[in-house]
Image: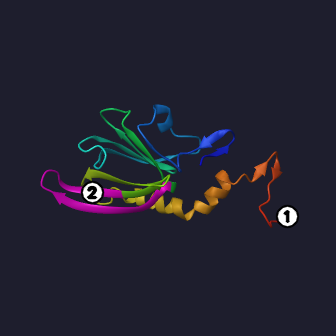
Amino acid sequence: MTSKVNNDFIWQDRDIRFDSRAVDLELRKGEVAIETLTEVEDTKGNTGDRGMLVSTNLRFMWISAKKKRTNLSIGLHCIVNMRLHTKSTTLSGAVHTVVVMTKFQRSNFEFIFTIAATSNTNTFSRMQSLYRSYESTRLYRDLKLRGAIVKNKELSLLRHEQVR
């Protein structure tokens, strides 16, 4: 289900999109890039392919460094759970991993992103904090962005709601 505000569809936080056009990866009005990580591997979907992971206030986007057409857009509304791990591998040494469990249109998806461990031990923790912030404001977002509060310059009341 897509919502419409000012004749502009808001899908960024509600959809999961694979291999999107460049225009779909651009930040929409009100969307803010919070953090950009480079050299991140989409371990489950594009093993061995490193790219850029952009966290915004509406979604996480992974864009391949080799081929920009290979990308993901994961709306924060679709996320069910996130787990952070740090592990040691024989090939790469210590790595940070974030596992993102999602649900979209009756399908479940699991995304795994990996980055080499650096001195910063909380590489993906900002993503988790961003997701938690989004979750805590879900009701507000639904009312503000999708609630059709004003129609034809008149306040639309909800059922059983009164203005005094």
What amino acid type is highlighted by mark number 1? Val
User: Image check: 153 left or right of 117?
Assistant: right
Q: Residue 32: where, in percent of width, then height?
A: 52, 46
Q: Is residue 151 above or below residue 130?
A: above
Name the colour scheme.
rainbow
The image shows residue 116 at horizontal and vertical percentages of: 24, 51
Question: In this picture, which residue range is highlighted in magenta?
Answer: 78-99
Residue 124 position in % (x across, y down):
35, 56
Q: Position of residue 163 (x, y in %)?
A: 85, 64
Q: Residue at x 38, y 57 (%)?
A: 100
Mostly what secondary structure, the magenta segment? strand
Mark 2 and mark 1 residues within 8 Å of each other at the beta carbon: no
Q: Secondary structure under badge 2?
A: strand
Name the side, left or right, on which 152 lies relative to 107: right
Circle 2: residue type: His
Residue tagged by mark 2? 96
Given residues 19 and 12, the one toward you in this image is 19
Measure the alpha-carbon separation of dots 2 and 1.
52 Å
Corner quadrant of residue 71? top left
Crowd class of label 1 (few under 14; some 14 to 19; many from 20; radius 10 Å): few
Q: Extreme right residue here?
A: 164
Q: Name the residue tied to disc 1.
A: 163
The residue drawn where x is 31% and y is 36% is: 65
Is-magenta flag for residue 84? yes
**Helix, strand or loop status at disc 1:** loop
Q: Residues within 10 Å of mark 2 (few under 14, many from 20)?
A: many
- The one of 45 and 91 positioned closer to us in this rendering: 45
Badge count: 2
Residue name at image x 52 percent, y 59 percent: 134
Confirm whether the magenta stretch covers residue 164.
no
Q: What label sits on residue 21 in the rendered view?
A: none
Locate residue 18 relative to residue 118 in the image: left or right.
Answer: right
